[in-house]
Amino acid sequence: MGDARRFRGPVDLHTHSSVSDGTETPAEVVRAAAAAGLGVVALTDHDSTAGWQDAAAAVANTWTAAGTGLMLIPGMELSTRIEFASVHMLGYLFDPTNEALVAETERIRSGRLRRAEEMVSRIAADYDLTWADVVAQTTKGATVGRPHIADALVARGLVATRSDAFAGILHWKAGYYQPHYAPDPLTGVRLIRAAGGVPVLAHPGTAGRGRVIPEDRLARLVDAGLFGLEIDHRENTDDGKARLHELASRFGLAITGSSDYHGLGKPNQLGENTTAPEVLDAIIAEASGSQPITG
Ligand code: AMP
Ligand code: FE
Ligand code: FE
Ligand code: ZN
């Protein structure tokens, strides 16, 4: 910690590439992070570490505005679920070859694939959309989600933007929604810790179904090793943030802030929310599964 710090500049700990539902390749996300003036970027694709290598290779040639190498924090956003509410768990610096975690992410990704096919067959009953349209919008091997169906709907001219698709056809109220397999958040925290990683609850104060996590559940996540709460995120409501700050101080949890950048897939801009350098120091100090990568 302290003088051993190997990074300078803003820290953004949540981004997506075309390995999941971002629109840029992992290397492009890394280059965009440097161009945006970040000192540190975490790549956190949904349920996949397939972008780590490309991102790491891109970091080797990437310099920040501060004149230091950009630091890449390899990570993932693990899909978990409490009944019908999806709960996203960020994991940082875990071992990407950990067998239990690899098996669970494979199970989630195949469940997501079946679920996307099921949603498309329901949509196809009412709209001119095929599974091939969705495949055409998806990078081979990527974690498939509603954003890929949204892109297919846009390509077909059935909606104007991803956001319109989410507000309409892909909204759970529209009747085409289907859940997918995901483990309990407690399992998620345990898997990430067992793989030497550091778990942070992603955007826990969003509006609608994903309200602030119940306190008794949070207590159990903390006991299992939850490190922090992603409070500074555009989708957390003001009320949600206030409650999360209370919970963070009560449970001794760290606070992170991030963009949740998806390239052109969402309005979120790199560095729009950031994490304090001391918090990143603590994440790096607690992690034992993999190392930050510096250019
Ligand atoms: P899924 O996990 O397949 O149900 O899809 C949820 C994903 O869609 C999240 O990871 C978000 O990044 C993305 N998403 C949710 N709402 C929107 C929106 N309004 N516009 C673009 N992407 C969205
Ligand atoms: Fe996403
Ligand atoms: Fe998320
Ligand atoms: Zn995300």
Image: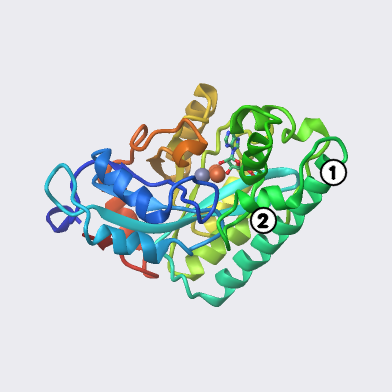
The amino acid beneath tag 1 is Arg
Mark 1 sits on what residue? 122
Mark 2 sits on what residue? 184
Would you say residue 236 is visible in this rendering? yes
Would you say residue 285 is visible in this rendering? no
Residue at the (55%, 33%) spot, across then down? 205
Task: Report whether the residue tagged 2 is closer than 8 Å to ligand 1.
Answer: no
The amino acid beneath tag 2 is Asp
Which quadrant holds residue 160?
Answer: top right
Q: Position of residue 191 (x, y in %)?
A: 55, 66
Q: Residue furthest top?
A: 238
Q: Position of residue 7 (x, y in %)?
A: 20, 52
* Label 2 element class: loop
Residue at the (44%, 61%) spot, across then down? 51
Quick one: label 1 or label 2, which is nearer the N terminus? 1
Residue at the (44%, 33%) spot, across then down? 268
* Label 1 element class: helix
Q: Which quadrant holds the N terminus?
A: bottom left
**For discs 1 and 2, the disc positioned in front in the rendered view:** 1
